[in-house]
Image (cartoon, rainbow, N blue to C red):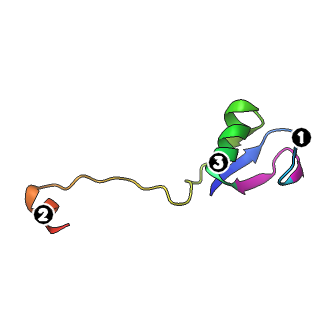
């Protein structure tokens, strides 16, 4: 799930009418559509659920343990 803030009035089949300032939690594809294709939303500061930050092991010994 991804969180976006609506920038104006948006009518969707899934969520009905959304207004400026509404926060919507939706799947990444629909959020990207609203942000990039429509210009109707912006991503919030919250990180998307399930986002993984990769950390490289500090040494070969640690890599072997993992």
Q: Indicate the position of residue 38 as horizontal and vertical percent values.
A: 76, 32
**Residue 44 circle label:** 3
Q: Indicate the position of residue 64 as horizontal and vertical percent values.
A: 12, 63
The secondary structure type at the circle numbered 3 is: loop
The residue where tag 2 is placed is: 64
- Which residue lies at the image location 16% right of the left edge and 60% below the top edge? 63
- Which residue lies at the image location 9% right of the left edge and 56% below the top edge? 60
Q: Is residue 54 left or right of residue 36?
A: left
Q: Quadrant of the N terminus?
A: bottom right
Q: Indicate the position of residue 47 as horizontal and vertical percent values.
A: 55, 53
> Which mark lies nearer to you, 2 or 1?
2
> Which mark lies nearer to you, 3 or 2?
2
Asked if marks 1 and 3 touch (Cβ < 8 Å), the reply is no
Q: Where 52 sits versus 36, above or below?
A: below
Q: Where 12 sits versus 50, above or below?
A: above
Please tell me in which quadrant of the rendered image residue 36 appears: top right
The residue where tag 1 is placed is: 9
Residue 9 in magenta? no
Residue range in magenta is 16-25
Name which of mark 2 and mark 1 comes first in the sequence. 1
Principal secondary structure, stretch drawn in magenta: strand
- Choose between 2 and 12: the one closer to the eye: 12
Q: Indicate the position of residue 58 as horizontal and vertical percent values.
A: 16, 55
Please tell me in which quadrant of the rendered image residue 33 appears: top right
Q: Is residue 8 left or right of residue 35?
A: right
Can residue 35 be seen in this snapshot? yes
Cα separation, mark 1 vs mark 3, equals 17 Å
């Amino acid at each position: 799930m991804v969180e976006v803030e609506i920038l104006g009035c948006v009518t969707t089949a899934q969520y009905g009418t959304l207004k400026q300032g509404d926060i919507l939690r939706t799947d990444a594809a629909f959020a990207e559509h609203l942000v990039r294709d429509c210009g109707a939303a912006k991503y919030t500061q919250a990180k998307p659920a399930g986002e993984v930050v990769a950390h490289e092991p500090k040494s070969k010994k640690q890599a072997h343990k993992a």
